[in-house]
Structures are given as structure tokens and as C-alpha cells.
Image: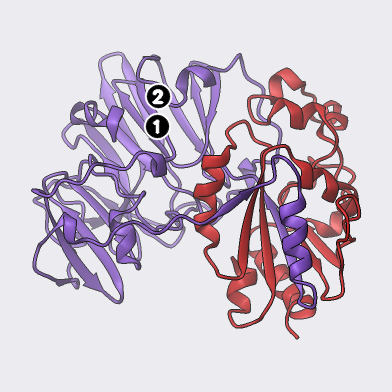
Amino acid sequence: MALLEAHPETDFEFHAVWVDVLDSDSPAAAASAALFLDDPRVRHFHDRERRFGRLLAPRVGMPAARDLLDDWQSSVDEQDRVFTRDFLTGPATAYDWIAFFGPDARWTSEPELPAPTAAVVQMAPDTWRGIDPARFFWGPGMAAELRRLADLHVAR
Amino acid sequence: MKAAASLVTAALALCACRTGAPAPEAHPSEPAPQAAPAATSELLPDASRAALGGRVEFVFDARATVQLQIENRLARISGRVELVALEGRLLGARVDAAIDLPAPAPATRVELHLRDGRWLALDHAARSFCVSEDPAALAGPARYAAALLPADLVDPSRWIPAGATARAGETTEFGGLDCASLEWTAQAARGEWLIGPDGLPRLRVSTVETPGREAEVRRLVVQRWERRAFTPRAVVPPSGWTELAPVPRAAVPGPRTPIEVRSLADSVEPLRLAFEAGAGKPRVIGTFAPS
């Protein structure tokens, strides 16, 4: 990914958390997806129960899907062809976010996840109302933003 | 290649590897289009029993998720996907080739070709090919032994330029293993093909016309690829490739070592401890849907 490629020699850590939100997500899918971030600085985790996704959501302002169904003019029954039912009906769960934490950030107990110094999301702005619009990036724009943030927060 | 292998001789199929370039108009974070009740459970992981009829459309989104619409029924298949359709009917769907490695076939010979650091493996017997910068990937999860290779699939000189590039947004790349396979019944199919910068073809749109039926298969293509027409011909390595002596498939390096993925099913503690262990360094946490 752009972030790792932009700083191939930089000593930082990347934690890839594969969060089950889509109906097809699974441990096998996570193992397969991990192959696409094959870098010694990357550690992979599979978040089947969306535990970390729920911890991160309030830190980045991720809304709950259940609160957006009206916006989508849709229903749980309809959306569960795409998302897991628990994701649709449960608390806000962050996915497709990339969050940066400084060297001094500490995470001393499970609920005390520190606030990231920067975070961006690869989602459709029109769909996920409530997220800071400045955090949405996509495609080449996301790659450029990640490189910019990496220069600010990763390169030392 | 268990289910597909018995079907491919008369079928059109293709595999969709994970994309590298997203198609914004079909984002996984967007709500699904409204549709009639889905047949997902019938299609996964093996839909050969589903035998659904009618027009089949594949719509690829940013994560190579496939939305499969069959007679207004919408299903979604994610990950590595191989679909087999015959006479407009979806016969098989297989997800995540990584869990279904083709069995080694020592008697089969694979030709290896090397150009600019990229390896091409041609398996004439299986009519398959695979391209990778990593020779280990040639025998890895992304290798599809039962793929049928169109007769002139790897000879760009036989392809006729036929127009401009694909539309913006219709972009993808074959996934992290950079490997592709196509299954194709040449005499029954008419398609629109594109040649990639690696000299290999990609199927964009193909149709198989049979009485009363039409199966249309769409796949996304890299924008800069050149569109060419397809004409049958014998299998010939792409010009410019340095041909090496054919080698047994067993001599091709094995698949990559799986990457450890730690479960957070019980607690986020493994992640927290890893985060804390990295104190003093910048840390980045990315959250992604795995499929």
C-alpha cells in the first residue's frame, strides 16, 4: 500500500485489523487478504466480533450503520446481503479507516484506546453521513493523502 | 479446482482476483442496490447445484466483490471468485482459491518464461497461464490449473488493435499475486479483449450466444490496456519473452508462507499489547473488511 511503499526504510509499525463487517468476511478471508500487506512492519489481526472496530469508531467519528438506514432508504433485511446483521444492528464499528498514532501514544487498558493524531477513511461520503468530510479519500487521492500523512506522522 | 474442473470444458468462466484500483461507483461501503430476495446462500461456496437460468451479470466493486444478478436476484460473492456459466446459467461459484489448491501434477509440464523480471508460466496441457514477479506465486493459491487458455491467448502479435482504452472507473489489476486465469470456449464465445502492459490479454466483455440464452460477462480492465480483437491461433509465448526450457510443474517454487493473523475474537488484548510494544515508534492502525 502507498503508506508502506512511501517509506520502505522507515521504522514504524502497522497493525492491520481485518474487521468482519461484510457478510462474506471470515478468518479465511482475513488470511487471504493479509497476503496483500506482506511487509515485516505489518502485524495482522482478525476482528471477528468487531471489538476493535467498536473501540475505534468513537475516536474517528464513525456512525452506526443502523442510524443510517433511513438515509439509505433501506432496511436491515435488505442490507444484510452485503453487511453482517450484527454490523447493521449493533453499535458503530469503524472499518476502512487508517489511523495514525504518535510515538508517545499509549494504550494502557482496553477501553482507553488513544485518539489518533490523524485518520482517514476510504468510504463514500454521501453514504456515511456524520463523518468529517475532510477525512474521506479515494483511489489516487487516498494514496496521496497517505503519503502526506506518512511524511508528517511516520517519517522521523 | 474441484467443482469447476468438470465443468470448464464446455463453459465460460473467469476468475476475478482482488483489485488494486478501486471503482468508486461501486463502493463496498455503499448500501446494496435494491433488489429482490438474494440467492447468496445457494451460491456459496459451490453453486453448481444452483443451476440458475437467465442473464448473468457481474459487477465488480472496489474489493473485487462481485455482485451477481440473476433474473433480478442479487447475490454477492467476495474474495477470489471463480464463476462458471454455461448457456446463460450459472453453474458454479468458488470463493477464495487459497483454500482450494490444485493438486500437483508431476506429469504436467509448465513452460516458464522470463521478461523484465516477470515470470510467465504456461501450462499447455491445462491451457492455463500465470504471471508474477514472484515465481513462488506461480504455484501458489492464485494458480488455476483447470483454466482453459484461448488458443492464441499469449501471442499479442495475433491481436488486432481495435480502439481506445476502457472507461475511467473500469479499472482493476489482478491481485497481489498478479496472476490471472481465464477459461474460455473459443468457438462459442465472442469477446472484447484487451492486452495488458505485460503482453497478456484480459477479457473485458464476452458473450456466449446460444438459442434463447445469452450470458454476458463483464470484467474490469486496466485503463491503459489496449483493446484488441481475438483470433484463434496456436499457443505461442509472447514475443519478447525469453523462453526457458520447459520445466516440470514440481520444479516451480511453492506457494508463499501464510502470514500469521491473530484473532481478536476473545479480546483486543493481542492488538493492545502489540501497540504498546511499539511505543516509541509511530504506529498506524488500518481497519479493513477482509473480503
At mark 1, the secondary structure is strand
The x and y percentages for residue B173 are 45, 56
Mark 1 crowdedness (10 Å alpha carbons): few <14, some 14-19, many ≥20: many
> What residue is pinned by disc 1?
B94
The x and y percentages for residue B111 are 14, 60
> What residue is pinned by disc 2?
B46
Say which colour chain A has: red
Say which colour chain B has: purple
- The residue at 62%/61% (across/down) is A43
Tell me: B12 left or right of B283. Answer: left
Residue B5 occupies quadrant: top left
- On the question of residue B239 being in view, the answer is yes
- On the question of residue B162 being in view, the answer is no
Q: Is residue A146 above or below residue B41?
A: below
Q: Is residue A89 above or below residue B124?
A: above
Q: Is residue A156 above or below residue A82?
A: below
Looking at the rendered image, the quarter that the C terminus of chain B falls into is top right
The x and y percentages for residue A154 are 74, 77
The x and y percentages for residue A149 are 76, 73
Please name the amino acid that badge 1 sits on.
Answer: Arg
User: What's the mark number on residue A69?
Assistant: none
Looking at the rendered image, the quarter that the N terminus of chain B falls into is top left
Mark toward the start of the polypeptide (1 vs 2): 2
Q: Chain of mark 1?
A: B
Q: Is residue B47 above or below residue B153?
A: above
Please name the amino acid that badge 2 sits on.
Answer: Asp
